[in-house]
């Protein structure tokens, strides 16, 4: 399995290097590192969106003025934002672990 994975990764990497070299781009980063960086950026941006929702929900809560509907809406948005942040942090941790393990496997056998 590791040999197949290393072979596939090596084949993809050589194809990307050839295409990048022809286009004038030079990169020695493995494919797993590039994909991991893209996923981390997407998860980071999504986390920023959820933090903005959390700030907005806090603003709604502070300006609710004791109106029950507005307070309930703000509390629900706060709860959903916190759940979203927890999901994003978990996904970030899992992705980081998996790509580090995959990078270790592909560099150890390649």
Image: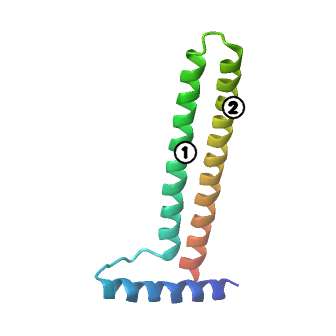
In this rendering, would 16 be left or right of 110? left
Quarter holding residue 7 = bottom right
Circles 2 and 1: CB distance less than 8 Å?
Answer: no
Under tag 2, what secondary structure? helix
Residue 90 in picture, x, y percent from top left: 65, 49
Quarter holding residue 110 = bottom right
Q: CA distance from mark 2 to mark 1?
A: 15 Å
User: Which is more toward the observer, 33 or 80?
Assistant: 80
User: Which is more toward the observer, 79 or 91?
Assistant: 79
The numbered mark at residue 47 is: 1
Asked if residue 1 is positioned above or below residue 33 in the image, the reply reads below
Residue 84 in picture, x, y percent from top left: 65, 42
Under tag 1, what secondary structure? helix
In this rendering, would 19 be left or right of 90? left
- Looking at the image, the residue that sits furthest to the top is 66
Instruction: State the quadrant of the N terminus.
Output: bottom right
User: Which is more toward the observer, 24 or 32?
Assistant: 24
Q: Residues within 10 Å of mark 1 (few under 14, many from 20)?
A: many
Asked if residue 44 is positioned above or below residue 5 in the image, the reply reads above
Q: Which residue is mark 2?
A: 79
How many marks are shown on the rendered structure? 2
Asked if residue 26 is positioned above or below residue 48 in the image, the reply reads below
In this rendering, would 10 be left or right of 4? left
Residue 38 in picture, x, y percent from top left: 49, 63
């Amino acid at each position: 399995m590791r040999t197949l994975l290393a072979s596939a990764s090596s084949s993809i990497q050589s194809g990307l290097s050839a295409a990048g070299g022809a286009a004038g781009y030079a990169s020695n980063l493995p494919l797993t590192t590039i994909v991991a960086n893209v996923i981390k950026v997407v998860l980071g941006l999504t986390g920023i969106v959820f933090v903005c929702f959390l700030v907005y929900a806090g603003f709604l809560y502070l300006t609710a003025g004791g109106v029950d509907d507005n307070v309930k809406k703000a509390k629900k948005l706060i709860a959903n934002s916190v759940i979203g942040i927890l999901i994003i942090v978990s996904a970030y941790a899992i992705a980081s672990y998996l790509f580090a393990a995959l990078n270790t496997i592909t560099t150890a056998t390649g």
